[in-house]
Amino acid sequence: MVVLVPQGARAQFLDFSQPARATALGGNLVALPEGPSALTFNPAGLGLQDRFQASARYESLFPGLENDDISTGNLSLLSPMSSLGAFGLSWDHLGANQLEQDNIRLAWGKSIPTKGIFHSLEVGFSFSYLMQRYVLSVPLQNVSLTNVSANSLALGGGLLLSPFQDFTLGLAADDINSPNLGVVGTDRIPLLLRWGMAAKLFSHNPVQLTLTAAQSLSNSQLDNQGGMELFFSDFGIRLRGGLDDYQGAVGFGYEWSDFLIDYAYTFSAFGNNQVAGVGLPGSNLLELGLRWGGVTSESEYDEYMRKAQTAEETKSWGWAAWYYQEALAAKPNDKAAAEGRARNLPQYNSQRAARFFKDGQLAEQKASLEDAKFYYEMSVKLAPTQADYAAALTRVSASADLAASQAKAEKYYQDGLAAEQKGALFDALYDLAMAAKAMPANLDYARALVRVNDAFTAKAQNSGSEAKIDEIVRRVSDAVSRDKRQSALKLLAEGLRKYPHQPALELIQRMLDSGEGVTPGSAPNQAVQILENEADLYIAKGRPDMAKKSLEEALKTQPKNAEVKKKLSQLDSPVQTVSPDKMKLAEELYEKGLQCYLSGDLDGAVRNWEEALKNDPNHTKAQNNLVRAKLERESKNP
């Protein structure tokens, strides 16, 4: 068997045994030592460990190489110990036909208060027992077949510094004492230094990006490593890729509750890892992990209070308010935590208001007036004394109302033109009168109304009406054009009582009863038209349940109206079953959730809005706000 290493370098002991996530990110997570990676790269990362975690991994190295069977395995256990920091224990094993190596490592890490100078600082140390054994097929001079093994102790340490949130710097050293593993004579493992940086971008978004860059130095050999990870937080999926000076790697991770699975595949790159000019085979690494438990409430309270005070000193109001809230959850009714939360929440709300205001400006620029109105409303609720926010809300509200009126008027106008083309002049007269009423300054609407009114009057007069009937026809037409349908009906009834069987009045009566362009038995009716328009608006806003109510009311007035029946049949039946009681309860739960959200209680907001959607799945405000609250809550996960 031949152990292959870069030319001019002495292989680190068990250098191949690395966590799957680290392998897929280029092989050096000194600045991102999360979970088992802290035991391999930087024990200071244990200072961030707040839950118990166990993992196991297996890797088949260079399958088929020189007919050797090379593999590595690992078992790791991480244990938080409250104010004492966290401890980790791991066992790494490398097995081949002629060589076995084992590394049993005990490590400790702890977070150190920085008094607001930095976001966080952690330190750590490690103590390892190293052992290797050779299997000799041919005796060697001065080597006893019963003594082909060696063991030694190794020391390590590390620092992890976060100057500000989501950016870390790491420095670690392994084999500080250069342990001797020589079977015959001296064979020392050289000191290994690692340093690097890591950045988490878009940490508040559903898709998050992590970048790492690092270097390692051993025996005057400087190597470079780097990688990238995309985290789809809604699905618990991580996609990874990385490089070092000799090989590339890809991999993925999946988190399901507290269960973790990670995979990495490495392959030769840049023509470096070769045997006789042929690149090394690819290697597969699989790792399984499990997290559970946590620190005690008292210790959790102390930790959250410390983090809250640090965040407050650095003016990270959102984190400070959240940490104080968590401290209150660990120790209810605690005065210090309650005062801290009350002190930081207004500052945090001011930040949130500014964020909502910016979102509103972007929505306004895109002409999404309803979205802009919502964002401005939230900014005003969070910062009611801010004049700019109130002015923006007033401006956009007026624009949104105007846009809604314009849309409504345009629909009436188009319906009126369509009715005019079909010759249904009475329907056209009504629709155009509604359009002109909604937008009185629109000359197109006014001209169309005058044109149809003249045509309607002329048609009635040309039907043979006598001169004494002309005034009644004119008054009926005028009443319809001024959206006074009931007055028109009353005038028509009076005219028919005075002049029964009068052709002009009978023509108008036929327009009302059977209607040109209207199915017999479903004569135009102002109330029905309004209810139909309401239903259309509800459908457009995603509320088919409310649309159904309007259409059912319309059908009570005109049971044979085919258009109303058609619209009712098109509505999705599951959505139609939302009862008024459930809609009322959903609205109450939505308001409760909104109050929780405005007070900074994201858990309460999520709980109430989820209950609201159980009662009314189509409550659009609850749907939109629930997504925002969940994203904000996930971004606060320490």
Image: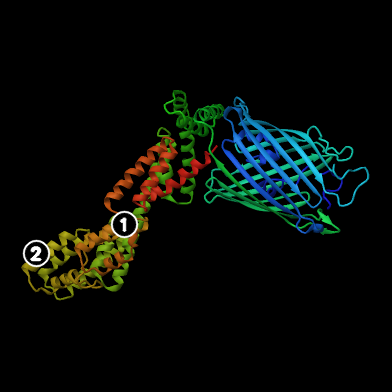
* x then y, percent, for residue 623: 41, 49
- Res 435 seen here: no
- Judged from this view, the residue extending furthest toward the front is 146
Which of the two discs, 2 and 1, labels the residue nearer the N terminus?
Answer: 2
Cα gap from disc 2 to disc 1, whole angstroms: 41 Å
- Compared with 358, 413 (above or below) is below
Crowding at mark 2 (Cα within 10 Å: few <14, some 14-19, many 20+): few
* x then y, percent, for residue 329: 45, 32
Disc 2 on helix, strand or loop?
Answer: helix
Image quarter where the C terminus lies is: top right
Q: Amino acid at mark 2?
A: Glu
The residue tagged 2 is 494
* x then y, percent, for residue 269: 77, 55
Q: How is the image coloured?
A: rainbow
Q: Is residue 257 left or right of residue 408?
A: right
Crowding at mark 1 (Cα within 10 Å: few <14, some 14-19, many 20+): many
Disc 1 on helix, strand or loop?
Answer: helix
Q: Is residue 190 left or right of residue 629?
A: right
**Foreground pick, 405 / 133:** 133
- Judged from this view, the residue extending furthest toward the left is 498
Q: Amino acid at mark 1?
A: Asp
**Foreground pick, 176 / 70:** 70
- Locate residue 219: give its quadrant: top right
Residue under the image location 41 percent in, 46 percent down: 373
Q: From the viewer's perspective, is the residue at label 2 or at label 1 nearer?
A: 1
* Circle on res. 545: 1
- Compared with 607, 470 (above or below) is below
**Foreground pick, 424 / 524:** 524
- Res 584 seen here: yes
